[in-house]
């Protein structure tokens, strides 16, 4: 993924990323399935409505919609995160709490170094069958 922009507002970093390869609903669900495994108290929203999911595999059965958002405390990053995927687009929005020194500023280079590999792993999951 390519970082398009990052901005700070009220202690949060709001970023927009562009996928290297387009994906559809199944790819979005595969990414959410991976993320759910690594989030503490994950919440999933479909078209901004909370959905109840008791396992990663149930995510693959979600009815196709315009967007899927997943949020929770990231075990890898050590801060709360929220990722919003938009069906049939190449855009992913990532919101990260500025709760550590690493995420205290909206510095493009530093943020890209901190989040780039994380976001690339998510994109790889979109195209990996399980």
Image (tube, grey):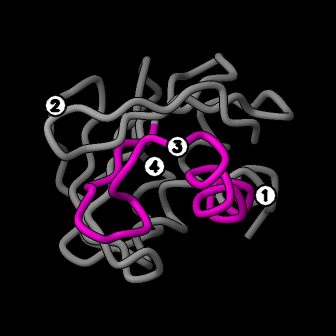
Number of residue marks: 4
| Disc with the residue nearer the chain's start (2 vs 1) | 2
Residue 28 x %, y %: 58, 42
Image depth: mark 2 or mark 4 in front: 2
| Disc with the residue nearer the chain's start (3 vs 4) | 4
- What residue would you read off at disc 3? 107
Horizontal side of 94 relative to 98 (left or right) equals: right
Name the residue rendered at 47%, 27% in the picture.
64
The magenta stretch is 94-121
Q: CA distance from mark 3 to mark 4?
A: 38 Å
Q: How many C-alpha atoms fall within 10 Å of the one at disc 1: few (<14), some, or many (≥20)?
A: some
Q: Secondary structure at mark 3?
A: loop
Image depth: mark 3 or mark 2 in front: 3
Q: Which mark is residue 50?
A: none
Image depth: mark 3 or mark 4 in front: 3
Q: Which mark is residue 61?
A: 4
Q: How many C-alpha atoms fall within 10 Å of the one at disc 3: few (<14), some, or many (≥20)?
A: some
Image depth: mark 2 or mark 1 in front: 1
Q: Secondary structure at mark 1?
A: helix
- What residue would you read off at disc 1? 124
Q: How many C-alpha atoms fall within 10 Å of the one at disc 2: few (<14), some, or many (≥20)?
A: few
Image depth: mark 3 or mark 1 in front: 3
- What residue would you read off at disc 2? 49
Q: CA distance from mark 2 to mark 4?
A: 16 Å
Q: Main secondary structure of the magenta part?
A: helix
Name the residue rendered at 38%, 48% in the picture.
105
Q: Are marks 2 and 1 in contact (CB under 8 Å)?
A: no
Q: Secondary structure at mark 4?
A: loop
| Disc with the residue nearer the chain's start (4 vs 1) | 4
């Amino acid at each position: 993924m390519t970082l398009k922009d990052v901005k700070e507002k009220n202690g949060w970093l709001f970023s927009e990323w562009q996928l290297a390869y387009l994906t559809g609903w199944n790819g979005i669900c595969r990414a959410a399935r991976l993320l759910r495994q690594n989030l503490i108290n994950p919440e999933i929203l479909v078209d901004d409505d909370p959905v109840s999911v008791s396992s990663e595999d149930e995510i693959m059965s979600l009815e196709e919609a315009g967007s899927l958002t997943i949020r929770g405390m990231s075990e890898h990053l050590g801060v709360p995160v929220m990722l919003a995927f938009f069906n049939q687009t190449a855009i992913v929005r990532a919101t990260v709490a500025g709760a550590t020194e690493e995420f205290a500023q909206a510095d493009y280079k530093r943020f890209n170094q901190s989040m780039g590999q994380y976001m690339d792993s998510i994109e790889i999951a979109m195209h990996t069958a399980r």
